[in-house]
Image: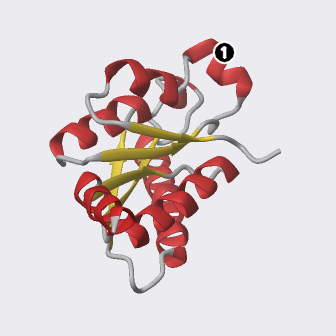
Amino acid sequence: MAASRGRSTLRAMFLNILVAIDGSASSGRALEHAIDLARAMNSKLTLITVAPPLSHYVTLAGVNPETMQEELDKWADGILRKAGATVPDDVVAHRVQRSGHAEQEILEEAERGQYDLVVLGSRGRGRAQEGLLGSVNGYLHFHARVPLLSIPTEK
């Protein structure tokens, strides 16, 4: 009886789960865990992918900014479609695509969307960029008012 009471309590805890997806193996594992949680708690998933911002160096290199932005948007759309295709039919899932800095866009969506949990991989961009720029995970850890579940990269 206590177990069923515990389960019903858990169901009420995480009704809306935001999952950050960037195409990395780590974010794929995060999605797997989020799907398991959604099934166990009858939760709704929202998958978010953020196309990186254009650098001012793009125009200096002679690249058309509109063309580059279109390519980045296509990349993000492809990531979302691929991730969405792995979500089973018995799990309700929505997709959100943004452009900008991933940490800021994910934080904004987490607060705007009234999510109960944010699930993300512990590594996305790679160690070199994380060391220089700070990780999305670390940023969300310090700024989010929503609980975070960080899934480590499989070894």
Q: Please give the residue where the numbered disc 1 appears in the rendered image.
A: 131
Image location of residue 89, percent across then percent down: 42, 86
Q: Residue at x 31, y 27 (%)?
A: 144
**Dividing the image into 4 quarters, which one contains the C terminus?**
top right
Query: Residue at left 45%, top 47%?
Result: 119
Relative placement, left or right, of 112 versus 81 is left
Q: How far across and how far down the image is residue 55, in percent?
A: 49, 27
In the rendered view of the protein, which quadrant contains the N terminus?
Answer: bottom left
Observer-nearest of 85 and 34: 34
Q: Is residue 57 left or right of residue 90?
A: right
Q: Nearer the viewer, residue 48 or 60?
A: 48
The answer to whether residue 22 is above or below residue 91 is above
Please tell me in which quadrant of the rendered image residue 146 appears: top left
Q: State the residue lying farthest toward the front.
A: 1
Residue drawn at x 41%, y 69% as measured from the top left: 40
Type of colouring: secondary structure
Q: Count the numbered circles shown.
A: 1
View extreme (right): residue: 155
Q: State the SS at label 1.
A: helix
**Left or right relative to 125: residue 137:** left
Question: What amino acid is labelled 1 in the image?
Answer: Gly
Q: For the point 50% across and 66% down, which residue is it? A: 36
Along the line of sight, the residue nearer the viewer: 142 or 126: 142
- Give the vertical position of 120 relative to 57 (above or below): below
Note whether 38 is above or below 26 in the view shown. below
